[in-house]
Amino acid sequence: MQDPETTLRQHDLPVTAQRLAVLRAVAHHPHATADDLAEQVRQKIGAISRQSVYNVLNVLTDKGIIRRIQPAHSPARYEDRVGDNHHHLVCRSCGLTEDVCCAVGAAPCLTAHAHHGFKIDEAEVIYWGTCPSCQKKPR
Amino acid sequence: MQDPETTLRQHDLPVTAQRLAVLRAVAHHPHATADDLAEQVRQKIGAISRQSVYNVLNVLTDKGIIRRIQPAHSPARYEDRVGDNHHHLVCRSCGLTEDVCCAVGAAPCLTAHAHHGFKIDEAEVIYWGTCPSCQKKPR
DNA sequence: TCATTAATTTTGACAAAGTCTAAATCTATA
DNA sequence: TATAGATTTAGACTTTGTCAAAATTAATGA
Ligand SMILES: [Mn+2]
Ligand SMILES: [Mn+2]
Ligand SMILES: [Zn+2]
Ligand SMILES: [Zn+2]
């Protein structure tokens, strides 16, 4: 990823302190929630409204600059690793989220057998399980 | 599936009108939301509280009698087709949800390469696309 | 540099989907 | 049929996110 200001200009987005800070926060904290990111941004630039965090995350997602993932039982999470069709491994117990390369190859799971006449554009895969640290915990 | 009353007794659940009605509604309306199901139940038994619908869906899900799926942008959906590791095909436009047999074989996507030391117990796959009917619509 | 305009940010209300709690009701059992 | 324990209900509450209008800021070009 290049520097956030260049990224914004390349996408015809006016450069604002809020956008820069959110974009940096996403880059530094992959799979963070909107709330997590607001927290990070506040530590950097002092203040940001909740609405602005959502505004920025939405516009960045629409432009394809970042990606939104929405596992069950969790608010949406964001990452700037886009366009590589990777998947996720989520701990049922603590929510820890790890990247996993696409199981079948390049963008393979997209070859979804033309089922039911649907025009398929994405295969979303989430592996659910227990992370090493939670496996150790009693209970 | 056998009759709902037997199912409940086999799982040591006291039989109530609400549980029977919700279980029947799930069987007759696969991939319905809690709200959809409440609606159906009311047509059958006259009334049920929102909380009871959730209570029942939760206990049935915990017992493994039904399954909960939670696609992005949608409230949770329920079905009584459990234990066969099937996946889902969801229309981005209208939310239509169809079953898809597991792409890789029996319970294959579970063989997830022992990544990151996680103990994986489920591979959830959602194919996103546009259903035939929505493909026809203008716009 | 400065004024103008369009876009962004903020504030505060609102919505959807669920959960929590205590009181009322019902089921199972004997 | 009485009892104990479980379920159901009502209503408040929480979380995550959106909407809309007013205030502020960024980009542009004179
Ligand atoms: Mn990722
Ligand atoms: Mn299904
Ligand atoms: Zn964990
Ligand atoms: Zn559709």
Image (spheres, coloured by chain):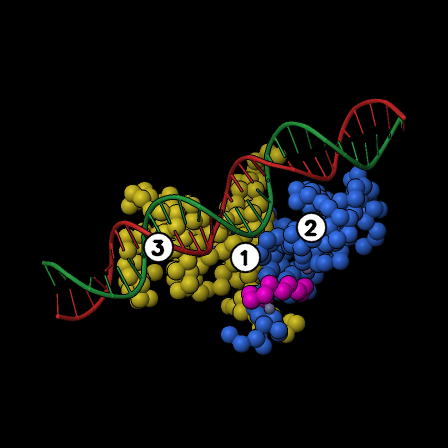
Chain colours: A yellow, B blue, C green, D red
Disc number placed over residue B38 in the picture, else none? 2
Task: Tell me how far mark 3 sits from mark 1, CA to CA.
Answer: 23 Å
Return the chain for callout 2: B
Q: Is mark 1 within 8 Å of ligand 4?
A: no
| Relative side of A133 to B47, left or right | left
Disc number placed over residue B73 in the picture, else none? 1
**Image: magenta residue range:** B90-100
The three-letter code of the residue at mark 2 reads: Ala
Residue B109 is situated, as x and y percent measured from the top left of the image, at 62, 59
B84 and B104: which is toward the camera: B84
Q: Secondary structure at mark 2?
A: helix
| Residue beneath disc 3 | A23
Residue at point 35% right, 55% down?
A: A23
Q: Is residue B5 magenta?
A: no
Residue at point 61% right, 56% down?
A: B124
**Mark 3 or mark 1, whichever is nearer to me:** 1
* Pointer 1 with pointer 2, Cβ within 8 A: no
Give the crowd class for mark 1: few <14, some 14-19, many >=20 residues within 10 Å.
few
Residue A39 is situated, as x and y percent measured from the top left of the image, at 37, 43
Dividing the picture into quadrants, the one containing residue A116 is: bottom right
The three-letter code of the residue at mark 1 reads: His
Q: Is mark 3 within 8 Å of ligand 1?
A: no
D2 and A38: which is toward the camera: D2
